[in-house]
Amino acid sequence: MEVIQLQKILGEYPLFRGLSLEVFSDLIAGHRFRNLRHHEALYEAGDLAHSFAIVLTGAFKLVRKTPNGEDVIVYFATPGDVIGGLVMLKPEGVYPISVVAMGNSTVLVLPRATYVSAWVGNAMMQSRLTSSLYSRMTSLQDDKANSKLSLQKRVAALLLTLLDKNEQKGSRLPIPLTRQEIADSVGATVESVIRCMSELSQLGLVRTEDRQIEILRADRIAEILKEG
Amino acid sequence: MEVIQLQKILGEYPLFRGLSLEVFSDLIAGHRFRNLRHHEALYEAGDLAHSFAIVLTGAFKLVRKTPNGEDVIVYFATPGDVIGGLVMLKPEGVYPISVVAMGNSTVLVLPRATYVSAWVGNAMMQSRLTSSLYSRMTSLQDDKANSKLSLQKRVAALLLTLLDKNEQKGSRLPIPLTRQEIADSVGATVESVIRCMSELSQLGLVRTEDRQIEILRADRIAEILKEG
DNA sequence: CGTGCAGTTGACGACACTCAACCCTGGTGG
DNA sequence: CCACCAGGGTTGAGTGTCGTCAACTGCACG
């Protein structure tokens, strides 16, 4: 693909908005595309971090293993998100978490060398990275604030957050999501999440079809969050 | 205080290490010191963010209010930590959380104007800020991963984390901490935390005197975290 | 046709929350 | 001087949400 075409695509995202062609091509020096199938890992926790990536299509879950061998989903990355950017600063850094594709997904992979040569010294990119970090940080803080809520409400909060990421594509969540993944994200067991989702289904607020979750009544789910 | 003296003090922290005097004095343009007593707020959530701060002595809790009016402690800031740095990027930003002093504490307050004129364009400072953010992010992720553990273990994890922040000052935690604050931090109620701490006391693993918590057997507390 | 993944349901029990007392200390005011 | 209050800490009894364990369905895939 031509650099100029790539700029058109990436220019849609806040991170790459309004850059000169010259700066842009420096920023993506040594880039390559990577296509991942469902469940395929982009990065494994503990691996030497020699590249970082920008999500183009699909979605990824950022996963941490607990000592018990359970998974905890720390973040859902969607198109435009930067993955592994933070760890590029350390010369011999390792990825702190695993990154796994949810459904067919593509990323733009950039070598650490490019980060060092073009990103570190570019104050605007640093500041934009910081800004994207800010929102991810806020979402983690939200999670912590929600941790005392009932499971019902935590699930509701998750559904609404994911729905928010969805631009214009209607009421369907942008990510194919299993009950297990919901559980790993809200900090509960599959069984409990299933009971909770079943209730929402019976109330006619959501519908699931092959891991695609459709939010039928976002307003009433928001009410669940607010009540008592 | 002379700028050169200030540089000596701040130069101890990674953030300000090895800077030329000229760059340094630009970075702290318009600085002023602020002393806060126990419980005094440095920033209130929702206030217009016209300054950020660097902790010099004491400690601060970063607090979020839940819809129910409960507090959630998101982070404990200790000397060298930057507070409010992330929100400086937004022109009309408001602080997302409140910042409250725990015991007598001092900070260096810097106006947003300084951030915009000297920090944003300085790639090294941006990269150092990012790096400090990285560790705060990791600690939030740790919290999320721990959220399924028993209260006993979450408290143990908190105590050990805080003990880690303590450089050389022995077995006493660097922060005066009430049971309520522990509860707000691990996501539990005061009563449950008290029962948990009482048990640790009776086992001779910790001792509390006027909010100062002393860790007598860090090794055995670490065992509690690992077992079962 | 067996294997693995996703989803589901029920019975049981435990951990932590709720509510209600109560103690102790230090400060404040009548 | 004593009463009162607020903040921090503690204890007990009762309750409920959610985790654990176990069994079972449906489906896709090689």
Image: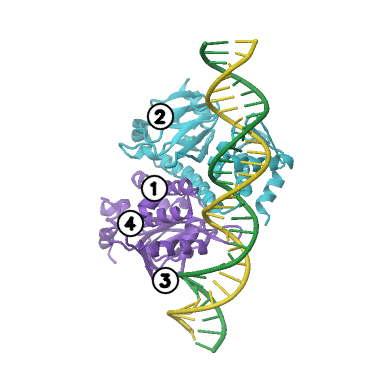
Chain colours: A purple, B cyan, C green, D yellow
Say if mark 2 contacts mark 4, CB within 8 Å: no
Q: Quadrant of residue A112?
A: bottom left
Instruction: List x then y, in percent, for residue A161.
Output: 37, 54
Whether callout 3 and callout 1 share a subunit is answered yes
Whether callout 2 and callout 4 share a subunit is answered no
The secondary structure type at the circle numbered 2 is strand
Instruction: List x then y, in percent, for residue A153.
Output: 44, 53
Q: Quadrant of residue A70?
A: bottom right
Whether callout 4 and callout 3 share a subunit is answered yes
- The span from disc 3 to disc 2 (Cα, nearest Å) is 48 Å
Label 1 environment density (alpha carbons within 10 Å; few <14, some 14–19, many ≥20): few
Q: Which residue is mark 1?
A: A226
Q: Which residue is mark 3?
A: A37
Chain at tag 2: B
Going from the N terminus, do you reach mark 1 or mark 4 first? 4
Vertical arrangement, residue A143 with respect to residue B3, above or below = below
Of residue A195 and residue A139, the one placed in the foreground of this image is: A195
- Tell me the mark number nearer the camera, choosing from 1 and 2: 1
Mark 4: amino acid: Ala
Residue drawn at the location 64% of the way across and 28% of the way down? B210
The secondary structure type at the circle numbered 1 is helix
- Tell me the mark number nearer the camera, choosing from 4 and 3: 4
Residue drawn at the location 32% of the way across and 63% of the way down? A172
- The span from disc 3 to disc 1 (Cα, nearest Å) is 38 Å
Q: Which mark is residue B110?
A: 2
